[in-house]
Every structure is written in structure tokens, then in C-alpha cells.
Image (tube, coloured by chain):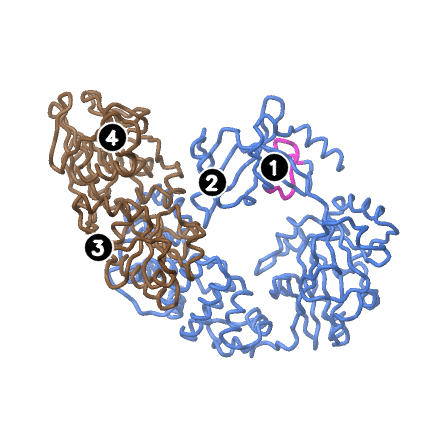
Chain colours: A blue, B brown
Amino acid sequence: MKRFAQLIQQLELSNKTNDKIAALVNYFNYADDKDKVWVIALFTGKKPKRPIKSALLKYWAINITRTPEWLFSESYANVGDLSETIALLLPPAENTSDFQLHTWIEELHNLEGKDDETKKEFILSAWNKLETQERFIFNKLISGNFRIGVSNKMLVNALAKQSSLDSAQIMHSIMGKWNPYEITFHELINGIHVNTDNSWPYPFCLAYALEQAPEKLGDISEWQAEWKWDGIRGQIVKRNGELFIWSRGEELVTDQFPELHFMIGVLPDGVVLDGEILAVQDKQVLSFSTLQQRLNRKTISKKQLEDAPIVFFVYDILEYEAKDFREEPLSARRKILEQLMGGLDGSPVMISPVINCSSWDELAGLRQTSRSINSEGIMLKKLTSHYHSGRKRGDWWKWKINPYTVDAVMIYAQKGSGRRANFFTDYTFAVRDGENLVTIAKAYSGLTDKEIKEVNSFVTRNAIEKFGPVRTVKPELVFEIAFEGIAESKRHKAGLALRFPRILRWRKDKKADEINTLEDLRQLLQSTL
Amino acid sequence: MALIEFTKRGIYCKQGDFYVDPWWPVDYAVTTHGHSDHVRFGNKYYLCHTLTKPIIKRRISEDLNIETLGYGESITRNGVNISFFPAGHIIGSAQVRLEYKGEICVISGDYKIEDDGITTPFEPVKCHSFVSESTFGLPVYKWQKQEIVFNGIRSWVHDNINQQKTSVLIAYSLGKAQRLVKNLAGDIPIYVHNSIANLNEVIMEAGVNLPKTIRITPETTKDELQKGIVIVPPAMRDSRWIKNLSHPVTGICSGWMQVRAHRRWQSADAGFALSDHADWPGLMAAITATGAEKVYVTHGFTAAFSRFLNDEGIEAAEVLTRFGQEDDEENKVDLVDQNENK
């Protein structure tokens, strides 16, 4: 397990994709084949059998180190990770072990069904022969996730580099159904459990933000305008009777969206569609936060399906009758698409509507209404354009609406987790309501590491009260908060809630008495109703 | 009446009318060691260890009124007997022992228990009350023996040289830098930043034996540096100078590197948990050895550590200082920039 422990350390220390891939390639060059299968499984979220609850791990660790529970909590708050806290608290190991990663996983598997005493004996003896970093990994195998900034894409790139196989093929293989307890590394990356020929996606065509006046683009009749949606960009691939859904991150997400599986019986073979997955109810596009409930889940519950039903808005067709259509002009592709989608009205797959406008002015006016339909603005695509690979200037533009902003003062701060476990990174903001301050949003991110350190030092010096991890601070730092929408809310004291609030910038030039008032926000709310 | 009180200016001994490590200018400042959060400009008189004198003269001003004591030596001020004992933190660091009418109080300053090979090792002093730091006062902070850490650094450097990378260690110029130099000296030449070279000179003039290092000058080539070990102070960390080296990789040497969250936050290429502060077992051992009836906890995890001591039956109180209560993240944020390495 030492090699794996070393890999984790390397991956954690580097912020550079290339270094991470190099570390992975190096690992895959030398590691045991059985271990490699498990590393792929762990990094893609396949958990090994876990016969022990993490609460028990904590309990045993507290017991043998005779650490008071509160002190364990203090330590945990500083470390930010349960597995690591336990690994650090334990006394140095008296023995060593040459067990490989897969051996540990199998041993843990064998504990299933055993009584707690046997489990405890096994765990304590394991702790006593693992170094701190190995112990951390071992505890993670039982209780945690390996969230260390390795995306599926990165993993696949490393495997492709190491094996000289095609990356899309490997992606399909590892996203398919396989059992890490049974499959060999060779079988896995060669995808003997899947037919990779059927799944190829195309690179997405991406747009730049429009920074000039749209009039400069020429006559509006040369352009197709569509609403810009804020969802998950994806491709639906149907070939040889199989259906695949790819997300823009080039990950297979077929299983996450069962609503779309009916397409297998609807689409002819040899079709690839480009579009956007959105949460939609009663033909109304819902906010991204609703869609979020559906993302990155391994299993989807009935309730989630009901609460956040999704629809695939089709933008484009890239392959038709098994032929690559990307070199056809957009107008021709759209025609085929409209024919193909004709009979699907009212189903969870629908064509993204074209906005008919005869002048830029008219379109600019419509753009202002984007928010009312949960759109982010307008997409402009040249009717003669090909479907490019990646981002190319000139043919496709996104003409987004500007976010709303409000100047607010920070009144609470809370520590982050993980990498930021020891810094106050989550802030609550307030606006003025007469003499009082009333909270309107909680936001994190949007600041640089350097700014976070600065805010952090302010918080520690100006904390007024402690409520667990939360500090009340002197209302002094003013931030400009951007947000996408505003809605009435009974749950919030202010009576309204902001959508997607985030810190736009730190207004060091402003004082706390110059911030916005609740009345300002109420007026904004009225204007959007 | 207690021998010391905690005031806005710092620890004050009323009977003797002097301060220990004051934060604001006073008449008479007893100084535990040369780090800038313990010794400030502007005091009329300073009392420090013999080896600390040239350091603070170099770092603060040549023009200071400084009295010195060696370890075990004492002077009397207004009837209070003041003596110094080794704190093991950095060269010249001292615990300050105060005795007045049979009452003994020891102020530890910063300290560590492990013999680092260059600093006079920590010596416990029996006392009635003890002022302890608690920078690493949580049980997750337990250091490995320094030899293991240094082996880790050596093999890191070795790999870097083989891979045509330049090894840059970030270490505070007073204390950590000399400890690295002393323990890493060998076949691979060690190149040090000006500020470190200057301090090394001062320290060697004072009679401490340090291995040979090479001062980095504009003439030093990237190629030479790539084949050596480069040691620079934290201020240089994100500098253009480092970026322009041949494939630079940075390693931070600090106790905070024990924890992943800190390692990742610092965005260095490597972190080595090497500290000049006592770890949890070290703090507990030191406090027990003093036999103190009352412990004052400063600098660090004051709340947690004092609570634990009280639970263990050792009467302890949390002392808020300008520099480091538990939540004063400056201690942690700047840990590598300033504090930990102090």
C-alpha cells in the first residue's frame, strides 16, 4: 500500500494537471495489476465493501489513545478529515506491513458478517503496522471518499498515455458496468465488458462571450438566435441499438438520467445530438440549483426524479445516418434536426426553440426578459457555421445578461473544509434595514487565496462572538455580491432570497454605511415579479 | 501576590518592574529569543542570552542597550532573581526563571524538546508556575524523529537533482535555516539567500560552529543551484527569482506540514513536518517535568490545551496574547511566512 499512499500524496500536493497525470502514469507503470483496478474503482467512486462504520473507527481510536471526545473534536476541526485525524492521533506503529492495496481491501471484505470484537482486533492490528499516511488511506477505504482532484477525464488521460489506447474508449470502459473484485486490469482498460465502438462522442463546439455590440456581427438574418440555458451540456449518442449520454466533462452520465432512456427506441441508429440537460417542470425551465440535486449521484431515488425532472433541450445534430454532419452548415443541420424531433413534442427530449427577430434591437429587448424564463441570455450562431471542435472565435457567441449586484457587509464567518479547513472562507452578508443589519446571503469562493488570508486575519482580530464554528464579526468589510435572481422567501428573515449569490469583489473602497438597504432589494424583487 | 501579570504590553513582573517579551516599548525587556514576535524595537534595556545579543543587534539595531546572561547565570533586579535556562527552540533561546521570596515562575518563550543538533537542548526547570506556549497543542501534532524527516528531505533533494529539478527549501532565516544547514550538510552544496548568509555569519562570529554554505549572488548560475540545495526565507516563496530557476520545486519545512489541509493550502511541492516547537507529547512532558502548580497557556491552541491540562488535574489558564490565541489564524496563516519558523 506504500506505493498507493505515495501516489495520493503526490496527487494532493500538485495543482498542475500535467504533474498529476505524470504521477498517475508512473503509478500505472509500476503498480500491481490488481491494485490498478482498485485505484480506478476508487477514483471513479466505486467503493469497496465497508464492513465497519466510521463511528466505530472513531470510538476505537478514542479508546486506545485515551483522548477525550471534545479533544478529538477540536483536533478534527483543525485537521478537517476524520480518517486523517484518527491516523494522526494513533501512536506510532510498532510493526510494518507489505500488504498491497487489494490485499487490504480483500481482508476488509472478509470481515463482513464478523462480530465487532473480531473487527476491532483486525483494525487495531492494522493500525499498528501502518505508517501515518498508509493509515489515513486505510481509514479512507473504510469510511471515506478519495476526493483528491482526480477527475475521470484525468484518470482516463493517464491510462491512455500509459496504455496507448484511445481515451474515449477507456472512458467508456471504466464508466461501464464492472466488478473490481473480479475484472483484470487488462480486461478493464480494453473494455471487454462493453462495446466501445458504439459510444464515441464528438468534441463540443463552444462559444466565446460577446463583448462587442451585436450590430457589429452584421445582418441579423445571417444569425440563428436561441436562449442560452444554464444546465449540463451533453451529447446523446445512439448507435447499434445502444444509447449513451455524455456530459461536457466528457464523462458518461447515461445512468443518471433514466428519463432519456426512451430515446433508445425513438432515435434511429447512427445519430448524435448536442444539447443541454435542464430541470423542467410544466414546460418551465427550473433553476440550476434544482438540477444540481440530480448531479453526481450513483443512484437516483424516485423522489429526486419527481422533484427535479429533467429535459434534454437539443441544440444540434452532429451525426445522422451514421455520417459525420459537422461540416454541414448550421441551417442544414437544423432542418434535419427539426424533422427528426418532429414527433417528440411533450417528451423529455425537445428541440431548443429558435428566437425569431427581425432586428438586433428587438433581440436586445427580448434578452432583457431572459431571467423570467431562467435563461442566462442569448446564443448567437451563424447560419453558415460548421460545428467546430472546441472554442473558435467568430461563428458562435454567447450574449449573456449581466448578474444583479448588491453591496453588503460581512457579519458572520465560518471555517471551510478540506483544503480550507483552517481558514474562515464561508461568509454571511447583510444589508441595512433601518438601524439593523439583516442577513441576505451566504457565499464562499470568489476571493483569491491571498484575499482569503486577509479576510481571515480580519475575522480573527474582530470576532465578537463564537457560535460553534461560526464567528460574529464587526460589520466592516464590504463586498459586492453578484446574484442571478431574487425571490420571495418565508424562510429567510429578510423575506427574500438571492439565487446563486457569490462574491464579485471586495469593495475596500466602501464603508459599512454605504451598503445597500433591504428596501433596495424589495424594489428589485417587485420589479421582477 | 503573583510574580507575573498579563498586561497589554505583555508579561509583567511587578516586583522586579520588568517585562518579558513585551509587544510595546518598555524600560526593561527580558527577551527569550530573537524572533520578531518576541523582541521588538524601542525598549530602553534588553536582557537576553549571550548568543541572542548579536542576533538582535543585527536584526533590530546595532544601537541597543543589551545585558546578557549565559544559561544557568542570573542577575537580580529589584530583588527578583532572573536566570536563563535552555529552551531548545533556536540558537540563544532561553526560558526565563524568576525567583522572589521563594516563589518561582518560569516563562518558556518558545521551546522544543528534541535535540536538533545545533541548539542547546531544552532543560526542564522546577517551578511553581509555568508559562507555556501551545503552538501545536493538539494531540494530532506528534513529530517524527528529526533524522527521519531529514532522510525524507535528502531523498527528495536526490530525486530532484536526478530529474533536473532545483530543490528550494523555504525556511525562516533565523532558526530553521541553521537547523537545515547543520543537518543537511554533506556532499551536496547548500546555497543560502543573503538574509540567511548574514545571520549565519553573525552566529558563527558568536562562536557557533556551522557547516559551510554558499551565499547566493547574482553570479551564482542556475546550473550550480540545480545541483545543490537552495534555502530561502518565506518572503521569497512566490518570487520571480524562484520561478526563473531551472525547474524549481519548493519544499516547506514546518510543523504545520503534518496536516494535509495545511500542505495543500500552502501549495508547495513538498511539505516536511519539521518544527522548532514542542509537539503534544513534548508539551505534556515539559509541563509535567516542571512540577508547576499553575500553568499559563499562550501562543497557539490555548483553549483546548488549557482545558486538557485542567482535566488532567493541572491547574491551567488561557492567556490571550497579541500573537496567538487559538483563533488567531495569523499564527497559522503566517505560520510559514513568519510564525512557525520563529
Q: Which mark is first along the chain, 3 or 4? A: 4
Magenta span of residues = A489-502
Q: Nearer the viewer, mark 4 or mark 2?
A: 4
The chain letter under disc 2 is: A
Is the residue marked by circle 4 packed among few (<14), some (14-19), or many (20+) residues within 10 Å?
some
Identify the amino acid type marked 2.
Phe
Residue identified by numbered label 1: A480
Q: Nearer the viewer, mark 2 or mark 1?
A: 1
Q: Quadrant of residue B286?
A: top left
> For residue B64, which numbered disc appears in the image?
4
Q: Is residue B258 visible?
A: no
Query: CA separation, marks 4 and 1?
Result: 49 Å
Identify the amino acid type marked 3.
Pro
Is B310 on the left-hand or right-hand side of A390?
left
Q: Nearer the viewer, mark 2 or mark 3?
A: 3
- In the displayed image of the protein, which residue is found farthest to the front? B219
Q: Nearer the viewer, mark 4 or mark 1?
A: 4
Q: Secondary structure beneath disc 4?
A: loop
